[in-house]
Image (tube, rainbow, N blue to C red):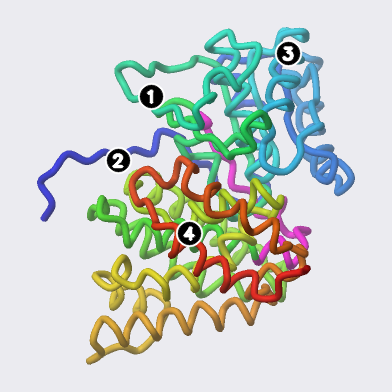
Amino acid sequence: MKTTLSQFSLRTAIQSGSNARALVPSLFSGLGAKRILLLSDRGLEQAGIVEKVASIFELTGNGSGPQIVGTFLDIAQDAESRYVNDAARFAREIGADGLLAVGGGSVLDTAKGVKYSLYKGLSDIKTAISGGFLNEYFPQAQPMNIPHIAIPTTAGTGSEVSPIAVIFNEDIQMKTNIINPFINADIAILDPDLTVGLPPRITAFTGFDALTHAIEALASPNATGLTDAYALHAIRLIEKNLPEVVSNGTNVAARSDMLQASLMGITAFSFALNAIPVHNLAHAYGALFRIPHGLANAVFLPVVMEMIPQLYLPRAVELAQALKVDVKSDTPDVALSKAIEKIRLMQQKVNLPVDFTEFNISEEDMQHTVPAVMKDPAALNFPMPPELIAAIGERVVPLVVK
């Protein structure tokens, strides 16, 4: 039993179920919001998801309830700070008093950045994260009092409930972090109907993002019984449901389980936050080569577990059991080996790559990876030596393009 100080909270209220999006207008009314800014992206607009959500507000009766007064769709991969700034400016122009985020991690993190900018009166979110990392705790951090509902359309980041906003700072070419216990949504809507059209590849790598959150939480030196409960069950749900939703995307029950696994994975990760070498590498490579975050995690996860076994060995048996691997009388070393083997099998089942060959990363490009990994905020608690970073890089970029 650990007796050192730890924190755990799930401030966001969760509404789960098919067609749960229908609750949104009444929930905003309860939160006291009338003028709603909807944030999403062009892909979800083309897929009809934005309209599915926006049309609900037409049923609130002669404009008597909350209304969408603006829609902001110019959001790109990685929640770029310029789009956070543009969206916050637009929110002020239309007099929005509530935020509705509909999308994957980039959209959800952009909305968090907008809320933070509005609350702090910032015209440029980069001023808050110029050094790459901002950590604010209660009582210094206070409720932002901007009604905020998030509807994830991917089961991966869990950003709807996470107290962490990951925002790309173009000036320093880094994925930066704002940690604040009030930056997450007031209410999260887990509506599996909005995820059934997600392409198999994106379904696969966002699912591996959730798996990585859970495994890094379980292995963390700061893990507690509370974070373990969330991490272990998230792993169980992902092992069971990820191959199914990749092969049969219309399975609403499995989609719903993945949304809950995503939420649990990030909650465990956020409150066990310490050693996160997989995310450290994924952040750096993602920023340098614009590799989708979940895909970067998927490639790095088994490699890092093999290269830094000492981090995972203490919980290897529990991890293997959560992955439904038989390790009854195995030593931790054998259990870890079997767990990694199972993760690679899952990679194969959902058709994810084992390296970054598709991104045509050159030998010259690779020279930037070691310093990028070392300066990433995720390196603070678990710095890796340059030789280890380079060795991992050789595993994930085996065929360097001259």
| Residue toward you, 187 or 111 | 111
Badge 2 marks a residue whose secondary structure is loop
- Residue 289 horizontal side relative to residue 254, left or right: right
The disc at residue 8 is 2
Query: For the residue marked with disc 1, what is the amino acid?
Result: Glu
**Sequence order check, earlier mark of 4 and 1:** 1
Query: For the residue marked with disc 2, what is the amino acid?
Result: Phe
Badge 4 marks a residue whose secondary structure is helix
Q: What is the CA distance from the residue labelled 1 to the residue labelled 2?
A: 15 Å
**Sequence order check, earlier mark of 3 and 4:** 3
Q: Residue furthest bottom?
A: 329
The disc at residue 89 is 3
- Residue 182 horizontal side relative to residue 84, left or right: left
Q: What is the CA distance from the residue labelled 2 to the residue labelled 4?
A: 22 Å
Q: What is the CA distance from the residue labelled 2 to the residue labelled 3?
A: 33 Å
| Residue toward you, 18 or 293 | 293
Q: Tell me the residue that label 4 is attached to.
A: 278
Write the start and end of the magenta stretch as one range: 184-204
Residue at the image point whose x is 57% and y is 78% from the top: 346
The disc at residue 337 is none
Q: Tell me the residue that label 1 is attached to.
A: 136
**Sequence order check, earlier mark of 1 and 2:** 2
Residue at the image point whose x is 48% and y is 36% from the top: 164
Query: For the residue marked with disc 3, what is the amino acid?
Result: Arg
Q: Nearer the viewer, mark 3 or mark 4?
A: 4
Crowdedness of circle 1 by 10 Å Cα count: few (<14), some, many (20+)? few
Crowdedness of circle 4 by 10 Å Cα count: few (<14), some, many (20+)? many
